[in-house]
Amino acid sequence: MILNPRARALFFIFLLLPACFANPLTPAQEDAVMRGFLWQRLMNMPKEQRPKIGITLSAGGVRGFSHIGVLEVLKESGLRADYMSGTSMGCIVSALYISGVPFSRMRALAYNPDLTYLSSDLSITGVFKYLLFNKLFSSASFQDFISEEVGGVYYENLPVPLACASADIKTGEKVVFDSGPLALGVRASMNLPGIFAPVEYRQRYLVDGGVVDYMPVDLVRDMGAQWVLSVFALPDYSRTVPSTILGYILRTADIRGALITENSEKNADFLLGVRVGDLDMSKPAQTIEAVEIGVRTTYGQLDAIKDNFILFSSDYAFK
Amino acid sequence: MRLNKIILSILLLAGAFAPAEAFLWFGGEARRSAAVIEAARAAYARADYADAVDIMEEFLLKNTSKKYLREAYDIIGRSHKMQGAYDKALLKYGEAVEFFPKDIQLNLALADIYYLGGLNGKAVQLYDKVLKLDSGNLPARLALARAHLAEGYYTKAARYFGEYLDAGGEADAGFYYDYAVSLFMSGDYGGALSMAQKSAVLKPHARTTFLIAKIYKAVGDEAKAFELIAAAGAQEDAGDEILLTRALWLAADGGQKEALAMADNYLKNNPQDDLALFIKYIALTRAGRVKEGLKYLEPVAAREGGGLIRNLARKILNTGPVAKTSNLKI
């Protein structure tokens, strides 16, 4: 059948019509398709067939509650750490997480942070003794509290290897806990100098690891992590000046910690900064807000984190 | 005389407690206000939104009583919203909520405008406020679920979808689909499958079949996943995303020939498409034709701009990987 010119024109228009109305994906949509596919592929791979993942949680005092929100989102995304490390609050949260303490329990602890968990000396008498006789508080009851939460487990029996940083106040050395009772290592890592008496262990006098290593990226690298996500609970001093002795001690520790962290930042593959402002521990809504800030920050950066890991693992992704 | 004085005293006392409007022209002001409100309602009902706004704005200027204030603000807000003037609706509802901070409908209306305008954070705050005022408010619960889904907060979205359903909220295919997505993204594959299947029963749709395929892929049932994505692709409302995802799956896992054919077909109409070119690379590489495959990455890597696919191409070709390494400046 020979078509006349008009019919031919209509025929070609008919052929082209689907293209005219086709709705190709945008580059961002195509990236989402690729990201979803490769992320699932990599996360479902046995760990021997992909890069080993390390997660480091920084110190940060009550700001460290934000780590709970970060881990919630990472777990939900399918990311499983092969190694973890932490200092101070980072050590507490990673210990609870690896030991299988539910997020609901961690949130409950965040909602109602009870200072007596830290020390049974935090009473009027205890404060009196501290101020008048320089008698530091004991953090032994905190070790009992953690031991109860994690079921008295040892580092060696954890499903994910964990290392916690503490400092020997006598020698200035970093002392790493990656074996022995988990609760002891956690206590040593958060043992705030000047407030709590040092933890005496094997001729060491141990205090908060933030003194020497605020964000222990090196510890997960040493354990074997090839790709490291580092989470930094950032302070924001812009609006407040401390008004208590404890406030000044904590602020000084924060400033020093931030300076120490500069090198660690460069050693991570991805640094997630969670901006948590100054928090008032006496207000439960603020501490739980720290958790929510952790959640929202992580959701906001999740695609970037995934992309970073996918690019790092490109040699593995198509095997 | 004495009785008259008593009656007059009683009347004066009663008048002291009566609303002021009752004395103005014997209730004429109230009647005029009612008439103006009625005119605005009529204008809104016949979709003359501009007229409704004008009537109510003038009313707000001249009106001294609080009686119709709430409705005036609501009519203006709704009229702006119907005209797509979300910024004006936002202003008006914002003013209204200042006058009536505990009014649930006004707070909901303001929250809806924030949500439509993409200001999820503010929308969520207001929906939360409504739930604090009225814990059984189903529209607020559903709106919170959708707002959290939009911002990617999947666990919360799933929680609110679940609460809405448990509280007896009405659920259509769209509801079950959104609930399924929030469950899928939060890793609850069993729950996601259940909700997605409910959605599919109510209203079959390619995107629902596609979601079910992705769920099966996530749990490792490859056979079922491939079967369903093919079925989704064959449905009338299937889009390019389903087609390209299927090609990607095939390229990576045993269907290289078919993947190449699909990618070639797609490239006929979209010759610059990054994903289709990358699919060709994957298929050829998996088939052992690596050098040939790399050629398809060259135009992708050479394109300007970032993005995962382009950066992957650059990384593989060693022409400069660009991965974001932090949300902070280091």
Image (cartoon, grey):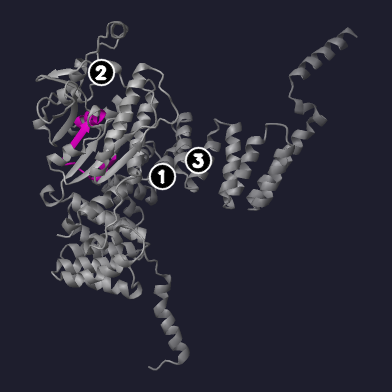
Three-letter code, disc 1: Arg
Residue at mark 3 shares a chain with residue at mark 1: yes
Q: Secondary structure at mark 3?
A: helix
Q: Quadrant of the N terminus of chain B?
A: top right
Q: Are marks 3 and 2 in contact (CB under 8 Å)?
A: no
| In the image: residue A39, left or right of residue A2 | left
Which of pointers 1 and 2 indicates the residue nearer the eye?
A: 2
Farthest right residue in view: B1
**From the viewer's perspective, is the residue at label 3 or at label 2 nearer?**
2
Q: Please, is residue A164 above or below residue A30 in the view? A: above
Does the CB distance between marks 3 and 1 fall below 8 Å? no
The magenta-colored residue range is: A73-95
- Dot 2: element: helix
- Please state which of residues A214 and A60 is positioned toward the viewer in this rendering: A214
Which residue appears at 18% of the width and 30% of the height?
Answer: A164
Quick check: can you spot residue B195?
A: no
Residue B123 x/y as whole percent: 47, 40
Q: Which residue is mark 3?
A: B111
**Residue B308, percent across and down?**
30, 57
Nearest to the observer: residue A309 or residue B62: A309
Residue drawn 27% across the image and 36% down it: A261
Q: Which residue is mark 1?
A: B146
The Cα atoms of the two marked residues, 1 and 2, are separated by: 40 Å
Subunit that carries the residue with mark 2:
A
Q: Amino acid at mark 2?
A: Leu
Is disc 1 in the same subunit as disc 2? no
Position of the C terminus of chain B by quadrant: top left
Q: Chain of mark 1?
A: B
Instruction: Answer with mark 3 or mark 1, whichever residue precedes in sequence.
Output: 3
Q: Quadrant of residue A267?
A: top left
